[in-house]
Amino acid sequence: AFDQLEIAIRNDVKWFYNQRPTQADITVAVAWRIAYEMLKEHIPIERYPKLIQFSQHAENLPEFSACPIEPQ
């Protein structure tokens, strides 16, 4: 799934469909972050630079920083 998301994320836009994040954007960012926190030793992060950047962009939003994910 992460391979397909890496392909789907375009360099020229911030979000998948609009200039504002949609449910799809939020879901991808949250799914990536939780999966990475739980399985980081199994995820080769060098394969997912766009996904990492996408997630970080979402996590910079005030709504995300209001609900931080505590690393395990």
Image: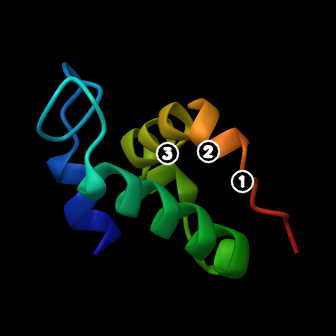
Residue type marked 2: Phe
Disc 2 is placed on an element classified as helix
Q: Which residue is mark 1?
A: 67
Q: Residue at x 61, y 71 (%)?
A: 34
Residue type marked 1: Cys
The reply, left or right, for residue 54 in relation to residue 23 is right
Query: x, y percentage for residue 55?
Result: 49, 45
Front tag of 3 and 2: 2
Q: Which mark is residue 39?
A: none
* Most foreground residue, 68 or 41: 68
Q: Earlier in the sequence, mark 1 or mark 3?
A: 3
Residue type marked 3: Ser
Mark 2 Cα within 10 Å, few/some/many (few <14, many 20+)?
some
Confirm or deny contact between disc 2 and disc 1 (CB under 8 A). Answer: yes
* Most foreground residue, 35 or 44: 35
> On screen, 61 above or below 55?
above
Q: CA distance from mark 3 to mark 2?
A: 10 Å
Q: Which residue is mark 3?
A: 55
Query: x, y percentage for residue 47?
Result: 43, 55
Mark 1 Cα within 10 Å, few/some/many (few <14, many 20+)?
few
Residue that extends furthest to the top in the rendered view of this protein: 12
Q: Quadrant of the C terminus?
A: bottom right
Query: x, y percentage for residue 37?
Result: 71, 70
Disc 3 is placed on an element classified as helix
Query: x, y percentage for residue 36?
Result: 62, 68
The reply, left or right, for residue 11 in relation to residue 45 is left
> On screen, 57 above or below 43?
above
Q: Earlier in the sequence, mark 3 or mark 2?
A: 3
